[in-house]
Image (spheres, grey):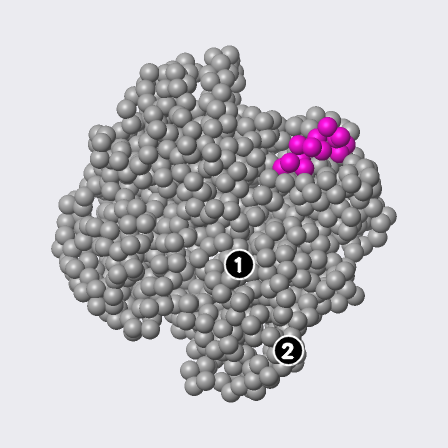
Amino acid sequence: MAAVRAQELTLKSPADKKSYRIVTLANGLQALLVHDPEIDLAAAAAQPAGPPPHAEVPSEEDVDSLLSGDEGEDSGSEDDEEGSSGSEDGEEHEHVHRHHSRQAHGGGAAVKKAAAALSVGVGHFTDPWHLQGLSHYLEHMLFMGSEKYPDENDYDAFLTAHGGASNACTEEECTTFHFDVKPDALLPALDRFAQFFIAPLVKADALEREVQAVDNEFSGVLQSDACRGLQLRCHTAKEGHLFRKFGWGNRKSLVEDPAAAGLDVRAELLQYYKEQYSAERMNLVLLGGEPLDTLQQWVEELFSAVPGGRGPRPTYGGAGFPYEGGRLFLLPAVRDEHRLTASFQLPCMDGKYRKKADEYLGHLARGWATELSAGVSDQSSVTWLFEVCITLTEAGLQAGPGCGLAAAGLLFEYLGMLRAAGPQRWAYDEQAAIAQMRFRFQEEEDASEFVSGLAADLFFYAPQDVLAGQYMFEDWDPALVTELLSGMTPQAVRLDLCTRQYEDAKSGLLAKGWPGAADGQEPWFGFPYVQAQLPADLLGGWADAKPSADIALPQRNDYLPTDFTLRCDQQAAQQAPAAEQQQVDGGAAAPNGQQQAAADGPQQQQANGGAAESGVFPSPPSLLLDEPGLRVWHKLDSSFRQPRAAAYLRLSSAAGYASPRAAAASHLLIKLLEDALCETAYLAEVAGLHYGIWWEGGAGIDFKLHGFSHKLPALARFVFASLAGLAPQPDAFARVKEALLRNYRNVNMSPAKHATYQRLLALKNCFWHADTVLAELEGLQLADVQAFLPTLLEGLCIEALLHGNMDAGEAAELARSVHAALGGAAVPADTRAPERCVQLPKGCSMLHRAPVKNAEEENSVVEAYLQCGADTVADRALLDMVEQLLYEPCFDTLRTKEQLGYSVHSGTRRTHGVLGLCVVVVSGAHGPAHLDARIEAFLASYQNTLAEMGEEEFEKQRQALLALKMMKDRMMLEESDRAWDKIGSRSYAFHALRDECAHLRLISLQQVRDFYSTYFAPGSPSRRKLSVHIVGRAHAAELAAEAPEGVQLVPEMQALPRELPLWPAMLGDAHACS
């Protein structure tokens, strides 16, 4: 069946080398075809397949995210387990298959991958009321085999064997499936994928297992404040409104309630699929290295059989707004926080994406205050919800009428000021300029994220605009801005207060006697809430309030870049005449200047701004400065050719972590600085400049600035001048201190983070416990912090990496100016005290148990840590080979077959230069003792798997791992992060990846077997195991249970660094690397 329409897409970023065509099949399916000329099909075909990507070297474990108190589980990445805490998907339901979070870190895309995504224009709005969560359940079931490929593991197994991964998510009005894979395996992977939408089996014997997976997903968010808030907004929508549907689904909604009603759930699934999954409701995006004609042929052959005829995707514009305005809702917070959310129901603005009126309003609202976020949080055909979220202090919670309502009053003063001032064309033009700049210098995305985003975007943008729609600010419409603002009134607002002081707030609210005040119980999550109508006099007062003197429009943005010149081109042009003269003076030269290149070496070429790099491994940064108190690494980029730069600086001072009190003062200084920088940081971020501060404990404080290079030095100078001259006012000090205290009280609320935290308490030679720091923080006064800052700066040593569109002279000038601004301390870099790791005794099996911090938490966690030894290239190669072999069987056994929990992962660890392996299971169904026993059983059985493995399979896996490690970065920051990891760890092992690949080519299967038997096999006399059990409330009895035979209980983790020897410090020689 040929396509009935085809159109080439030409509106794309100048930086985008791909070509695009959109076709529509006769059955109505729309497909966007993407040819990437950089996908080397011949090279991909020559590379043996293997499991999906992981990092070339595990990065050092960081402290900051463990002290963040953020919600969400840890990412599970094997190389950076304490990285980003993850974000909550809210009403989106992500169905993870096999390799979620197993992303390459710093090594770029593990393969220049092919990918595909298909988005179906139905989601949980379409769920029948008697089977809420059915869309999500069906999303799971489509992975369980098809008529053509009946093995329920066929799709996942094929992707695994060809370096791929898959994923899916269910939203309100669409469900998106996507995968990536080695380019030479795209066609057979696509054939399997197409069968999801042609003839899925929805196997009866898979129903129980997949509903358990859905239920496990739901159990994982029961203690999430963000998800509880979303569900309250669903539950309290108007009676009968589709916003009231329970989109997650769980065992009750999908098994128990249907059974009580006599429903055949499988029949309902099949009927829903038949009625809703129709070709004309589907957008397919296909990314490959093949020509567009070939990709089109594949789509026509494979997707023409998708059934159609059900008509366009359903839309719900006639449903009306879901909420009554002028109402307040209270719910209890799990974490120690007070957060007020003001929601406004805007009309659906599908088709008005060139106007960007909502983004204009979000920009102005975010510029109003520091402790808020603002913008459209939910887009549907029903309404666009514009939310302003305000983090409250204790004083803010109690001020005025209480319940955070004083902050709401200030919000309405600001909105009144915006209405009075009228639409501001200059603010819109600033946003337009920034969007155009981002579009012009667009960076490449992960292949799977790229295709899945486009598949969903095709529902929102006209096909010809889908590549540029999000950047379009082309139709300034002040009338629309005025219309939207006119609807953002006190009478229209919905206020939700999530507070740890729920009982007090509830009592105060009910005592007011406000109309409609009543308490209730959310039925799915099971938490209480209170609702009330805001009284007319309060609403009227807000509507009539005059703006305070300090409420004004945001200032114009001085951080907008205007110079996009590439320094590498400038230097190449400057050097060309000199090179020509040298050739004349020096006689015959090798072609293309190879003689000079050989003399200078790759690093010198790079530092001097030579031609773009070639080869597998990027050249490392060079040591530009090594002066008392200042060490600077630099690399001028000539590969990515973007006007961007990265400035990473570590400020180390022995005074900063000398005691728990010093640690508290250092952390409070950071937060005070962030508060002082907040307004400037927002303007810089809008202009494409980003900064962040990471508290790394004993190692120091990391500052990371990156973005467009033109104004980056100005931002850096402002940041460090602000630190040197930090003089917080008493009210700011009180507010920031309160927020940091709350942050420390929220540490370890996530069971998975709690497990990692306990392990690091046992392994790090200097790691002050958060509770000890909290106690010191309680007593700190403004004068204490002011007196501490000079002490911190007096002992300062700065080590920096400056990478990107910045030449050596600019880098040296910036680094020296920062050093001078901070006082110019002359502490030599090599005098910094090293961080070291505890050496667990051979043959040990240690166990630490701790209860979950949140008494209502159902989930338990086991983190089983197996320590190997000091990091060497040879052992790292062996460990990575073990991880490569182990990862998929571990997930398949413990998660898929045994259904221990929704989150299961394994991966390498490096703690202050000491290698290890972790297996982590999070479960709401089983206690830690059972989870640990199953981990041990798997590790024992895998020793037999290795013993039976043949050379052919081993060689395939070895070549797969080599292929993954030798891929180039997608964007410059990935290279920056990898280099910074070597600098931050003080190993300076910039060639570690190259050297490890050399070792990987030499190791044998028997060496891997021996390595596994020595360090990981149960019963090995050389095995070093430390297991952390975080015990959920359902299994609290385990806390008092006897330890299993041969297992040593460790009551206090911080006793281990005092009682056990330490591994040597794993430090490199900076000068040997320069």
* Residue 204 covered by magenta stretch: yes
Q: Quadrant of the N terminus?
A: top right
Q: Amino acid at mark 1?
A: Pro
Residue 724 falls in image quadrant:
bottom left
- Which callout, 2 or 1, points at the residue further toward the start of the chain? 1
Placement of 971 over or under 504, stated as above or below: above
- Dot 1 surroundings within 10 Å: few (below 14), some, or many (20 or more)? many
Label at residue 332? 1
Indicate the position of residue 875 as horizontal and vertical percent values: 34, 25
**Element type at mark 1:** strand
Whether tag 2 and tag 1 are in contact, CB under 8 A, the answer is: no
- Answer with left or right where residue 462 lies relative to residue 57: right
Q: Residues within 10 Å of mark 2 (few under 14, many from 20)?
A: some
Give the residues in magenta: 201-213
Residue 71 to residue 955: above or below: below
Name the residue beneath numbered marker 2.
491
The label nearer to you, 2 versus 1, is: 1
Residue 303 against residue 463 in the figure, above or below: above
On the rendered image, what quadrant is the C terminus found in?
top left
Most extreme residue toward the right, as rendered?
309
Instruction: Give the residue displayed 39% in from the left and 50% down from the top.
Output: 747
